[in-house]
Amino acid sequence: MSNWLKEPLLHFIILGAVIFFVYDITDAGERSGDDQIVLNDETLTHISALWELQWKRKPTYEELEGLISDYVEQEILYREALRMNLDHNDEIVKRRLSQKMEFMASDLTKLIAPATDEALQKYLEEHPEKFFSPPKYSFHLLTFTSSNHDNPKDFSQSLLRDADPSNLEALLKKGDITQIPTKFDEASKQKVDRELGIEFHSSMNELPINQWVGPILSGYGEHLLFITDKTEGYLPELAEIRDEVQRDFEYDMEQKSKEVIYQEIKKNYEIVINSESLDEDQIGKLSSLLKVTE
Amino acid sequence: MKKIIFTLYAISFLSFFSCTNNPKSTGAETEGSPSSKEDAISENPLKDVYWGDTHNHTGNSFDVFLFGTPNSTPEIAYRFARGEEVESPTTGQPWKLTKPLDFLVVADHAELLGSIPLMYSNTPGITDTKTGQTFLEIAPDKNDEAGLQKIYDILNYAAFDQPNEANLGAKDLVQDFGGAKVKEAWTRYIETAEKYNDPGKFTTLIGWEWTSNNRGANLHRVVFMPQGGDVAKQFIPYSSLESDDPEDLWTWLEATSQQTGAEFVAIPHNPNISLGLMFAETRLNGEPIDKDYAEKRMKWERSVEITQIKGDSETHPVLSPNDEFANFETYDFALTPDGDRPAPTRADYVRSGLKRGLELEKKIGTNPYKVGFVGSTDSHTGLSAIEETNFAGKGQHDATPEKRPHPTGIGSSKGWDMGAAGWVGVWAESNSRQSLVDAFQRKEVYATTGPRITLRVFGGYNFNEADLTGEMVKNGYEKGVPMGGDLASSQKAPGFLISAIKDPDGANLDRVQVIKGWVKADGTSEEKVYDVALSDDRTDGKVKVGNTVDLETGKYTNSIGDPELKVFWTDPDFNSDQNAFYYVRVLEIPTPRYSLLDAIYLGIDVKETGHPATIQERVYSSPIWYNSSQQ
């Protein structure tokens, strides 16, 4: 896991933000001046920004009027509801608040793990398997199928035995006549796998170039190959694949940070299972599922 | 204390905004780059086949969410189709394709697009509407499967203004959840599609599904386009809440295309449950089909989805009694609330639809049903996973073998009634948005029920046996037309160059067939199936290829069948006065149906699945038409 996820200061900032947020909501009913609803520029900007987030443009004045009157109504009913303790242990309120925390976690991801060049470079280096560009091959291919030969393997082996393996022309037209391609130019793994099956590209890895080799098995039958050129696999520079790296980085960070933030917050709580209706086995299972510490 | 926390919060809030500014500026760069990326990739004038799925649903579809799969996202759909291992949104288990697809259309239902997730996240303008409040009362918890199913049932009535217990109508839905309110979900989806479009490697096409369910008749159309986000963001996808008449959809496509420059492809699916309406003799308003209707339909709907998870629509044993392979993945569970399984009509299957097209052409001068063939999944999980060995199900309710003996909530079907199919093969110059869509427009596409069999078909008058060997593809394009094309009038019978190569990771081939349909002088039509190439040196198509599937282990061997079948075939029954179509069907040797693998896993008798232990997977080429009046 990345280092930033282990950084205590960041935890503090995140948790601080989260706690403030919750505190801000739950504590609101006790604040003084609670019977006052202030419409200042800050409020108006906030209302207008919320609208803009959804519609990607500023509201017109008429729209703003409607938004303000909705806001005032919501604020009054909300405060009244808090006064009447309607939020207390209400299923819907609980669910909404917990969802809100989840949303915050995904927004916070971008805050605590911005896709800077350094971060992306590091991510690229830590996940070479995701971005490695496999070797490309240019080669000639002969195919021998069981439709045309009783024993395609023996047949191709004897062809190879009787020819000068370094002479491309010697065998060039000796394969079965099929619509399976006979020539590949700088073919990627994707191309080779598509045309010749998912194992073929990796079976070419150790083959020498500039000579006939084989037989190699595919879903069609046996093959002889003459590789004329191989571009070795490599890990691209960040600049070449920045979009791709950023896409994967942000996706991964979001998945991870949600879980990390939850686990961090969870540390502050003790989960106690105290039930008559569950048997010991069930309690044991539940405890390990919730990772209840004894 | 509170002050300190507030300060920290304020700092982090500021830095949050300063960070989001950066990605925005790079975002602007990426939006411009797809075209330059597309320029850089190489083109093959003789074309390669690219495999994809034009019909995949995620949690933005109301039904995916309501079936209990809220975690399905376009992001996961793209990652899975690109070949990555993902956590299945239905089961949480890791899931991966045997080999990547080349492109994907995430085609969520336009109706209420994204509204259900928004409703559950307390979104002003959605949650607090009449519809939102009513639904939240019925299912306050987004994890309550029964409650969600109830909302789904209500929607199926409400959307078409039929009585329902929530007393909601189409107007409520549009006002509360529809129209401009889908904009946010649409915009978010477009941005994800842009992010995952990698020309040359993996293409995302922006699209949606128009879900007309007129009196329970499936008249759904998937719509997509080659243009990017800058064009797609200029409109909100047309939904059946606006109108459930396809002619209104075409009017909208025409107008929007002119306004924005979008090139739309619309593809109808599941004629098999269209209740006699997909290839009807009349328009939806009951008037007879005329030339104007035919021309409009052929402008927008040049292909039909012939196979998918909810069954195969090529033909039905009742309609094609002389076709011994017609009884394949038949699915007749109508989307009506009464669980009806109506008898097939000629309007419900593609082959009879093509024939009817010829008949109508004779009457009105234009063929309204001159369509190419597409296979796609219609998966409602986000996973385009339809390999028999790797089937992720239609949706949440048939996601695992254990669930499949039970009702799915879709018509009166049960899990094992679903078929693990299909994908589409596209003959294109490159794997890019424009090149792929151009291929759909010229119908150079074909359908598979699963295996990636490479199928080339060319028709023409100047071919001979020698064209099959050597440079067949070059000969094909130079001297004839590829699948989807038209042949002009001739006294000479047309000849066809056909080459089928097995999926290199799959089973051998059993046979190649040409299916011909033609219209006679009296205006009625006929059909005939020709066995044109047989494996294992057979000369008589009545001789079966055999079956190597071990019912105990679910394994088969490629000891029968051939890896490649190719043939030059000339129509022996040609009549130059009769308009006709020819399409190619290639069958694999028998392999295990996924339900056999389920039965082995569950330790039950395969008979309990109600489906055959083995099937012969197949590909269908788009037809080539012979036009006696075309010079």
Image (cartoon, grey):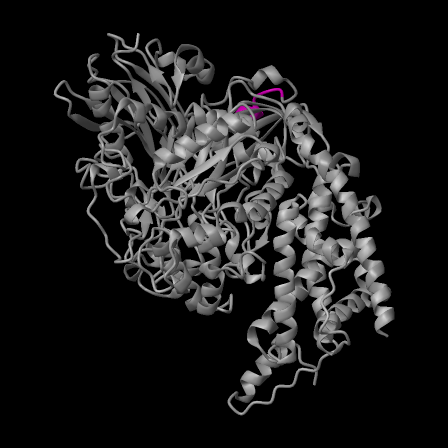
- Residue B341 position in % (x across, y down): 23, 52
Q: Is residue A163 magenta?
A: yes
- B552 vs B350, nearest the viewer: B350
The residue located at (78%, 68%) in the rendering is: A15
- B375 vs A264, nearest the viewer: A264
Q: Is residue A56 visible?
A: yes
Q: Is residue A292 magenta?
A: no
Magenta segment range? A159-164
The residue located at (58%, 58%) in the rendering is: B124
Position of B421 compared to A69: left or right?
A: left
Above or below B155: residue A273: below
- Residue A27 position in % (x across, y down): 73, 76
The residue located at (68%, 45%) in the rendering is: A58
Q: In which quarter of the image is the C terminus of chain B?
A: top left
- B74 vs A60, nearest the viewer: A60
Position of B522 compared to B27: left or right?
A: left
Q: How many callouts does the rendering have? A: 0
